[in-house]
Image (cartoon, rainbow, N blue to C red):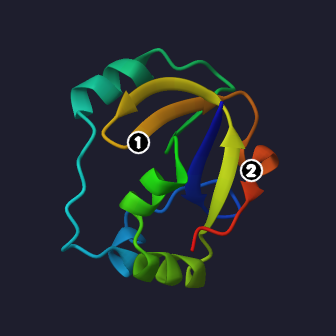
Amino acid sequence: MTFYRIQNARGEGPFYPGITRKWIDESIDRPKAPIQEQMRLLRDRKEGVFYCYACETIDDLRFWFSETEYKKLKKLGYFAYRVDAELVARFDQQCLIKTEKKLKKISVPFQLY
């Protein structure tokens, strides 16, 4: 299944301590995935399987990242990518996905805005 996400060259997303505050617009209301559900899903992780968050549609990715935020993210080395992976769970306009290949090896860049 194809998903869309923002990541750097190492396949890391931008919601990371010390990075998030450099680009996020706190005035935008974003839903949060239920923490307990996330922990339950991640409890049984297997060695060599990579988990991350992504969106099912480009419009959903635009919901999470405004054009202004995306411009800031690009300056920090984060870009929009398309990735084929397996769906683990759906949350509000985002999904938990997994793949046995490193994200940086299977991600294809695309123009978000």
Q: Residue furthest right?
A: 105
Point out residue 85 in the picture as x, y percentages from the top left corner.
66, 31
The amino acid pointed to by label 2 is Ser
Lateral position of residue 42 relative to residue 7, left or right: left
Lateral position of residue 83 relative to residue 30, left or right: right
Instruction: Please say if the residues under marks 1 and 2 sit with CB atoms less than 8 Å apart.
Output: no
- Residue denoted by label 2: 107
Q: Is residue 11 above or below residue 92?
A: below
What residue do we see at 67% from left, 69% from top? 111
In what element is the residue under mark 2?
loop
- Residue denoted by label 1: 94
Number of the label disc, if any, that sits on residue 40: none
What residue do we see at 49% from left, 23% from top? 88
- The answer to which quarter of the image holds residue 26 is bottom left
What residue do we see at 39% from left, 29% from top? 90
Q: Is residue 16 visible?
A: no
